Image: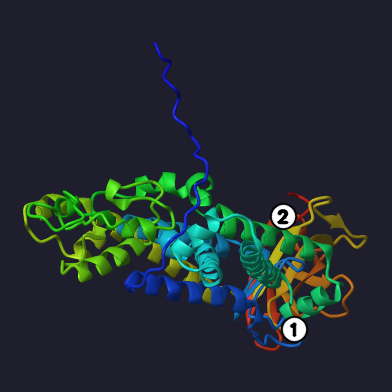
Amino acid sequence: MTTPQPPKLFAPQEPIFPRRVSGFFRTLKWWIMAVTLGIYYLTPWIRWDRGPALPDQAVLIDMAHRRFYFFWIEIWPHEFYFVAGLLIMAGLGLFLFTSALGRVWCGYACPQTVWTDLFILVERWIEGDRNARVRLWKADWNFKKWRMRITKWAVWLLIAIATGGAWVFYFTDAPTLARDLVAGTAHPVAYSTIAVLTATTFVFGGFMREQICIYMCPWPRIQGAMMDDDTLTVAYRDWRGEPRAKKRLEGTGDCIDCMACVNVCPMGIDIREGQQMECITCALCIDACDDVMAKIGKARGLIDYLALADEPEERAGKPPKPVWKHVLRTRTVLYTTLWSLIGFGLVFALFIRADIDLTVEPVRNPQYIVMSDGSVRNTYTLRLRNKHGEPRDFEISLTSDAALQLSLEGFDTNVMTVAPDSTTQARVYVISAPQDAAATAGTTALRLWVEDVESGERAHRDTVFNGKDQ
C-alpha cells in the first residue's frame, strides 16, 4: 500500500511573464502608480516655513528631537495617540475596502504591487512583451541576453537606490542629507538603511514578486474574515462561459479558451478556476477578457467584479443587484462609522490642544520643610513646554484659599523664558506665612497658573500644599 504524501506547503517559483494589456483597470493602475510613487519620492522635498528655529521640511520624522512634522501639524512624543489613531484608521480602512471590494489594496496600492508593476514596465521596455521575454528566458546565455539582462538589472538597481534614498530623506533635512550622501560624509546609518532598502526593493520587486504575496504576506490568509457573499471581487461567470470552445459552436459558452486572462495575470493564476488565495483582484484579467469579447462580438463582463450573492439570480437570467447595495450594507456601514468617529475625534483633539503644555509634580522627599521663622515650604517640579516657533516669556502664579507665596529657583521674578519648540524644567517653591493656618492644617488645595506674556493664553494644574499637621 502506497503511503500518501503530505501536501506541499511551498512550490518552486515558476517564471511569470505578464502580457501587456490596455483597458479601464490598467489605466487606473497606471494613475495610482504615478500618484503613489510621486508622493513617495517628492514629499521629502516640499518646503514649509515654520520659523527660524524649526525645520522647513513639510513632512519630517525628527528622531533626534522626538518630533513628527506634517505641514502645519507638529506631533510631540506625549501626543503619540495621534499616530496610534491614524494606524487604527488605516486598519479600519483596509477592513472597509476589503469587505466592500475584496483585495483592492493588494491589487492597486500595496507597495509590493506598485514597485513590481514598475519593474515589469522596465522589463517590458527593455526585453519586449510576453512572447519576447519567454523566448529570451529559454535562450542560451549569449551577448544579447547578457546585454538585456544587465541593462534591466541596472535600471532596477537605480530605482531601488532611489527608493531607499527617498526613505531616509523623511528622517532628516532632504537637501542637506543629499549633499552629505554625495560627499560621503553622511552618517553610516543613512548608508546602511539605503543599502538594506535597495537590496529588498531590488530582490522583492525584480525576482520574488508574487512569492512575497503568496508566502510572506499574511493578508491573503486574513482577508477571508473580512469578506462575505456580498463582497465584490474579480470572478468568472462560468454559467455564461462554459462549456469552452475554440470555435463558435452551438451550445458552447462565450469563453473561447484564448488564455488572455491567464497571460496578463501577474500572479500567473487562472481566474476561471474560481476564487484563489493568490488573486490580488488587480482586474487586469477583466480588461483582457473584455477586449476579446469585443473582438468576437460578445457582451463584456464574462470576467468582472462580482458578488457571490448574485450568482443564483444571474443563473436564472435575472439582473444582479445594484453595486451600491453590495457596498452599503451593515458591515461596511459599521466600518465607515467607526472610521469616521476616530477621524473626527483626532481632528477635534488636534484643534483643541493648547500651545502651552504644563506638568506639575510635588517633590515627595521631603514633603515639606519648616523654615527658621516657622513658615512651611513645599517644592514642586514644573515642566513647561513651548510649542511656538519663537521664544516666549511665561509668568508663573498661584491661587489658593491660604496665604501662599511663590518663587522660582534661579529666577529673580516669576517670569521664565522658554526656548522655541522646547521644554524647560524649573523648581517652584511655595511658602506659607508663619502664622497662616496652611502651615498646620494638613493639606490645602493649590492651583498653579502659567500665562503666556505675549498672547495672554493661560494653563493651570491643580496640586496640594502639605502643612505640618498633615
Which numbered disc, 1 or 2, marks the residue closer to the eye?
1
Q: Is residue 312 left or right of residue 410?
A: left
In the image, what residue type sits under mark 2?
Ala
Q: Looking at the image, which residue is at 51% across and 72% down?
A: 36
Figure quadrant of the N terminus: top left
Q: Position of residue 90 (x, y in %)?
A: 47, 61
Q: Position of residue 292 (x, y in %)?
A: 25, 66
State which tag comes first along the sequence, 1 or 2: 1
408 or 241, which is in the foreground?
241
Label 1 packing within 10 angstroms: few (<14), some (14-19), many (20+): some
Q: Position of residue 53 (x, y in %)?
A: 77, 83
In the image, what residue type sits under mark 1?
Arg
Q: Looking at the image, which residue is at 52% across and 62% down?
A: 116
322 or 461, which is in the foreground?
322
Identity of the residue furthest to the right in this view? 372
Query: Tag 2, which secondary structure?
Result: loop
Quarter assignment of residue 37: bottom right
165 or 395, which is in the foreground?
165
Q: Position of residue 56 (x, y in %)?
A: 70, 83
Question: Can you see residue 283?
Answer: no
Question: Can you see residue 356?
Answer: yes
Q: Looking at the image, which residue is at 43% across and 65% down?
A: 108
Q: Looking at the image, which residue is at 75% across and 74% down?
A: 422
Disc 1 target residue: 392
Disc 2 target residue: 441
Query: Tag 1, which secondary structure?
Result: strand
